[in-house]
Image (cartoon, rainbow, N blue to C red):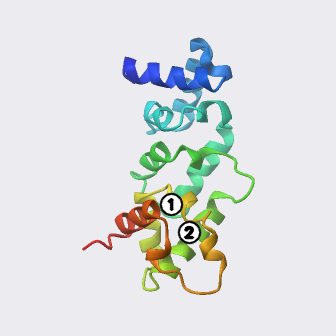
Amino acid sequence: MRDFEAARVAKNLALSKSVYEDCDDLMVQVDRLEKALPDVNVGKLLQNDASIVSSVNVAKAVQNMMTLYELGFKRERVPSMLEECPRLLLDETDLSARDRIRLVTERIQSIFPDETDEGCLYAIGEEPNLLWALADLEIFNREARVDIAELPMSVQEMVVYATRRFK
């Protein structure tokens, strides 16, 4: 991590009154994460969400990473997914990572009925933030098919990019 990146992470931790605003404590936690999550650039992970250092349970983070591998995400893609979407490491109470992936797969297929399960996994791998962007939309709670034009523009962009439907 470069000095200016570290300074931004430290500033964000100080603003959130994290117990890790102390440099020595932060380095111990970063070291734990680097050892537990091989191939993950912890610096990038912290740049995307500095608060993760305070809220992550390292054992659950490893379990969530292993779940991504078990579900068929490519070995070389999983570390990038975690760096882009640190929430994947958290122990969320509403849905497990496996259930969230299943739900988002169903939602992508409701938008694009011809999309395969493998295609949906690829899309989630490309845009892991879809796991929250699509899962949390109320529009999917109705019985009718959802048209992509009904989604918020930011979600439309993620879906189109991830599913490669812009050709």
Locate the C terminus by quadrant: bottom left
Question: Which mark, by number, is residue 117?
Answer: none
Q: Alpha-carbon neighbours of circle 2 within 10 Å: few (<14), some, or many (≥20)?
A: many
Q: Earlier in the sequence, mark 1 or mark 2?
A: 2
Q: Position of residue 141 (x, y in %)?
A: 66, 76
The total of numbered circles placed on residues is 2
Residue sitting at 49 percent across and 75 percent down? Answer: 150
- Name the residue nearer the viewer: 17 or 72: 17
What residue occupies the far left of the structure in this picture? Answer: 167
Residue 18 percent location from the top left of the image: 66, 24
Residue 5, position as x, y percentages in the image: 41, 24
Q: Amino acid at mark 2?
A: Val
Mark 1 and mark 2 in contact? Answer it, CB < 8 Å: yes
In the picture, the quarter occupied by the N terminus is top left
Task: Please name whichever residue, 13 or 122, is drawn nearer the observer in this view of the structure.
Answer: 13
Q: Which residue is mark 1?
A: 130
Residue found at x 65% / y 81%:
142
| Residue bearing the label numbered 2 | 104
Question: x%, y% of residue 68?
Answer: 54, 56
Distance from the alpha carbon under mark 1 to that under mark 2: 7 Å
Kind of residue at disc 1: Leu
67 w.r.t. 167: above or below:
above
Residue 40 placement, left or right of 29: left
